[in-house]
Image: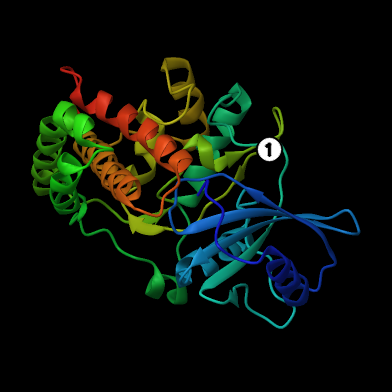
Amino acid sequence: MIDKPDVDERLLAAEVAAAWSVDVSDLAFMPVGLDGHAWAYRVDTSDGGRYFLKMRRGDFTRAAVLLPGFLRAQGLRQVVAPTDLPDGGASRGFGDYRLLLYPFHDGGSLWGRGLTDRQWIEYGEFLGRLHGVTPSADLAAVLPVETYRSSAGERLRTLGGQAAASEALGAFWDRYGAALHRLAETVEDLASRVTQGQHVICHADIHPGNLIADGDGPLHVVDWDAPILAPRERDLMFIYSRDFGDHPINAHRAELFRRGYGPLEPDRTMLSYYRGERHLDDVAVFLRSILDPEASAESRANDLYWLTRIAETVADPGYAP
């Protein structure tokens, strides 16, 4: 979220200090991410340490808390896992919120500047290894499993009427509403035609915005909030779609990625389903956020930018998920 949460930051800093036994010298809000239920802070400590604090309204899923540490134990060093509490566990309550504290990695995300050739190979190596990990019985019990039954189309239809009648979205809906309804129908058709593949552990949001690196340095993979057991195309969609990041895949980058990942022939229908469903889900999320009466003008403008970017893609006559 880019809007600050309504919390006392002095109490928040004190909670972090007490929970993780660190001497907090500064707590700085970070206006990053598009999740309407999560906020981020940089935490500096008196000994020169730095952490990334994620605060979520409501609970983190068990999979989001447990999976990153499990993957690091399997040797996937790129995974950024939450820091354990001294008395065990990783998540701490704070009023209506839950907190997770992570190591802070410099360099920023790769959404804007893209991956170097070496990083494209590492990207492939990481996903290849991730998709080869067998979850423990405890993890398998808490990881969601792909069903191909998305709620995004129904949410779009519900919110479309509100958008059409609203001052903020009326003109947008007049221009793009028909194309978005067609997308909902396309996604439902694709869901009925997918051939269900082998399920593997998927990050489910592994675009360049969730890859952090300092220069040409090693990748750090963040935001493990919604992992799922699904066909590998659930993750590969972010690589083979051109919608995610300012430097998307081309023939050269595809070859580098395959060099790291290994032999690869993704199911094209599956890729189309996941691309279309992601567009549809993002549209529904942004519509709801913009229609929220408590959203700030800055937040609405940011969400409308991303919403319009998706809608223009979908409305293009040559668009096919």
Q: How many labels, in total?
A: 1
Task: Say which quadrant the C terminus sits in.
Answer: top left
- The answer to which of 222 and 127 lies nearer the viewer is 222
Dividing the picture into quarters, in which one does residue 146 lie? bottom left
Query: Is 98 on the left-hand or right-hand side of 82?
Result: left
- Residue extending farthest to the bottom is 87
- Look at the picture and state if 33 lies above or below 124: below
- The answer to which of 186 and 23 lies nearer the viewer is 23
Residue to which mark 1 is pinned:
218
Q: Where is residue 2 in the image (x, y as percent from the top left)?
A: 53, 46
Name the residue: 75% across, 72% down.
14
Say whether residue 303 is visible. yes
- Look at the picture and state if 44 lies above or below 33: below
State the SS at label 1: loop
Dividing the picture into quarters, in which one does residue 240 lie? top left
Name the residue: 55% across, 56% down.
39
Q: Position of residue 165 (x, y in %)?
A: 16, 42
- Look at the picture and state if 35 lies above or below 319: below
Kind of residue indicated by mark 1: Pro
Query: Is 177 on the left-hand or right-hand side of 15?
Result: left
Name the residue: 46% across, 67% down.
63
Q: Position of residue 177 (x, y in %)?
A: 14, 34
Query: Is 223 on the left-hand or right-hand side of 318?
Result: right
